[in-house]
DNA sequence: TTTTCTTATGCTCAGTTTGAGTAAATCTAA
DNA sequence: TTAGATTTACTCAAACTGAGCATAAGAAAA
């Protein structure tokens, strides 16, 4: 129960840096898209968060608007001399630096790694392989209880029957695929994996990405964090496209703007954008003041008066 | 950018174990209520979570129903020989073991440490000292912008004007009091602290407790986790009291039961409890199946059909 | 110039959820 | 038998949501 000086571990920080560019969600990668950027935690740093922030800003030359700790895990696979490795992962929201190309680090569309998460154009191609693979996996269990349980989990995660997605379950979906052995990360080179099931990453970085996506998708619903991903001024439809990119869903246009407007999150700049094809759209900007004004945590409990 | 073996750190786990007993939220402490239980992370353990779970179950002789990682931080204050200390905190939900008394470890009412979080019987006594202290703090700033900002933050966190609490802001409230120097943890023995502002804890454990409270209060709204804190069978009012204990608020009785019933979270056991004074209440039990059946992540985005 | 196409924006409307409260039911204790 | 205390069943208006129609305001085509 007391604190002892045993088993020191190496600590590193892993960053999931997200931007939305050209209506696609993008994530910063290194090693030709195989890894998320990471680095050792240096003991001179004031705090974990500050350390990550300064490191990222040095790397990307862009201010890091929002940063949030995701998860900490002890890494089983990569052992170091005697000790253990601890990885602390962070989600950061930013905007993509201009120079795009095949450099390293490079921004990649996150659906490249998790293609089944993108339902903006209807059910993604990956669903076929997933349904087949999970069915086989469920059927492979000897115990009928386990079989039923596996089927149920598959249905909850992917909703095969009513063809829509609960966008917040991104992590659970990846974990299910992992458990079912449908992604290469799951086992040591089991041979043929369906190529429609996305590009793998090193270590458990794909799982960390899934964690980030799930967290961000949940967050945009009750906190005005999308704006960290937007330019200074934008149209409401532009904003909608960004949310759609993150959520992997199409939204109802009129209701989306009603939602934004009634919350008073944006104000008109007075200018319009004619680049939209039809009637020019008003340009708006985020009202940064709302961050100070309000608390954003809508209650769902039936509170009693007095 | 690459991973190097620098700066190994000592890693320990800190647990916030919560139970609800006699309609009060309780937390397991050690060192005569001064600390949260913690222990070194041992490298033999399969995973952080599993390690914590087995450790806690050994300590409490009670199964740990629910467990969730809270936050990881690098500890500035306690340095160990050369290296750095990393603390990983967890929230665990359980039920209090029978033997209660002045033992160590001991269960304590969490509002003992954060008395301003309990609004079940109206505004708590601590509010007077808080309002006074924060006002002084805001006024002490030279820059008028900082003054306005401090006042605004105080108002958001504590809602002095309309006398109700946003129960999810528990962490932000503690951090504000810390920043304003109103809790002893903030500075090295600054002298007289208002005793209505709760009992301090060692290290940053009070802050970790605040984190746990905030997280749990948010979670009970969209996940059926309260049931981990309940006995096998209970009445709806009993359940309401547990939620109220956690949230620090009184709830509207009829609407609370409507909420629970319409979600199909419980089923009748067929028995009744006559211990309630008036008309006997039906005893119910949690329908554990719902965990498998549903996903629980209500969308708040205006999704488009097709 | 007029028409057509496209997107932005405004508005309606029914169905559902929520906040708040009244009323009846059913037990214990006086 | 009655008073007191609670549980449980309804009611009702206000607010919120989902879905869609209608109009506005530009650009491009005819």
Image: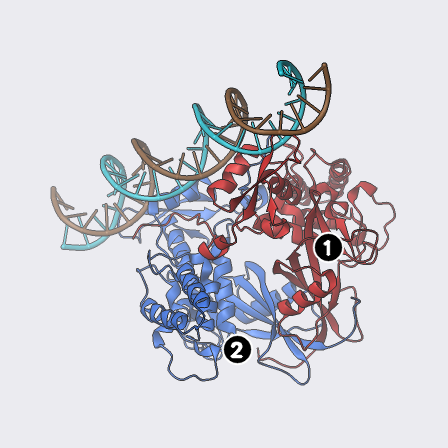
Chain colours: A red, B blue, C cyan, D brown
Residue B231 in view in this figure: no
Q: Is residue B125 above or below residue C23?
A: below
Which residue is found at the position 43% from the left and 83% from the top?
A: B190
Q: Give residue B1's mark.
A: none
Q: Position of residue A169 (x, y in %)?
A: 63, 46
Chain letter of the residue beneath label 1 in the structure image: A
Q: Secondary structure at mark 1?
A: loop
Compared across the picture, whether B125 is left or right of A64 comes to left
Residue count near mark 2 (Cα–Cα under 10 Å), binned few <14, some 14–19, many ≥20: some
**In the drawing, does residue B245 fall left or right of residue A306?**
right
For mark 2, what is the residue?
Answer: B203
Q: Chain of mark 2?
A: B
Question: x and y percent of residue B83 in the render?
Answer: 68, 81
Residue at (32% x, 65% y) in the render: B124
* Same subunit, tags 1 and 2: no
- In the displayed structure, B94 sits above or below A179; it is below
Is B277 left or right of A278, judged from the image as shown? Answer: left
List x then y, in percent, for residue D21: 52, 20
Residue A130 location, quadrant: top right
**Which quadrant of the structure image shows residue A44?**
bottom right
Identify residue for label 1: A97
Name above or below for residue B43 compared with residue A302.
Answer: below
The part of the image, by quadrant, that contains residue A1 is bottom right
As measured in the structure, the alpha-carbon distance from the residue carrying label 1 to the one carrying label 2 is 40 Å
Q: Is residue B305 above or below residue B29?
A: above
Foreground: B25 or B278? Answer: B25
In front here: A235 or B107?
A: A235
């Amino acid at each position: 129960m007391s604190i002892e000086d045993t088993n020191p571990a190496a600590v590193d920080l892993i960053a999931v840096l997200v931007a939305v560019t050209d209506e696609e969600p993008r994530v910063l990668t290194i090693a030709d898209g195989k890894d998320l950027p990471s680095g050792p935690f240096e003991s001179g740093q004031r705090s974990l968060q500050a350390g990550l922030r300064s490191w990222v800003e040095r790397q990307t030359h862009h201010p890091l608007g929002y940063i949030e700790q995701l998860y900490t895990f002890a890494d089983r696979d990569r052992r170091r001399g005697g000790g253990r490795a601890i990885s602390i992962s962070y989600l950061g929201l930013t905007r993509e630096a201009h120079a795009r190309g095949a450099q390293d680090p490079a921004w990649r569309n996150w659906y490249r790694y998790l293609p089944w998460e993108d339902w903006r154009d209807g059910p993604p191609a990956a669903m076929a392989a997933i349904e087949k693979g999970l069915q086989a996996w469920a059927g492979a269990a000897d115990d009928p209880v386990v079989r039923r349980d596996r089927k149920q989990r598959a249905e909850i995660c992917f909703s095969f029957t009513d063809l829509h997605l609960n966008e917040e379950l991104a992590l659970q979906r990846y974990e299910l695929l992992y458990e079912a052995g449908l992604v290469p990360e799951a086992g040591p080179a089991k041979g043929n994996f369906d190529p429609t099931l996305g590009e793998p990453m090193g270590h458990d970085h794909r799982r960390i990405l899934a964690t980030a996506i799930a967290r961000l998708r949940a967050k945009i619903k009750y906190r005005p964090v999308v704006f960290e991903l937007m330019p200074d001024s934008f149209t409401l439809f532009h904003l909608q496209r960004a949310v759609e990119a993150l959520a992997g869903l199409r939204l109802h246009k009129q209701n989306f703007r009603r939602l934004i407007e009634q919350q008073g999150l944006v104000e008109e700049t007075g200018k319009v954008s004619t680049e939209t094809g039809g009637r020019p759209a008003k340009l708006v900007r985020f009202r940064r003041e709302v961050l100070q004004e309000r608390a954003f945590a809508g209650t769902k409990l039936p509170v009693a008066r007095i």
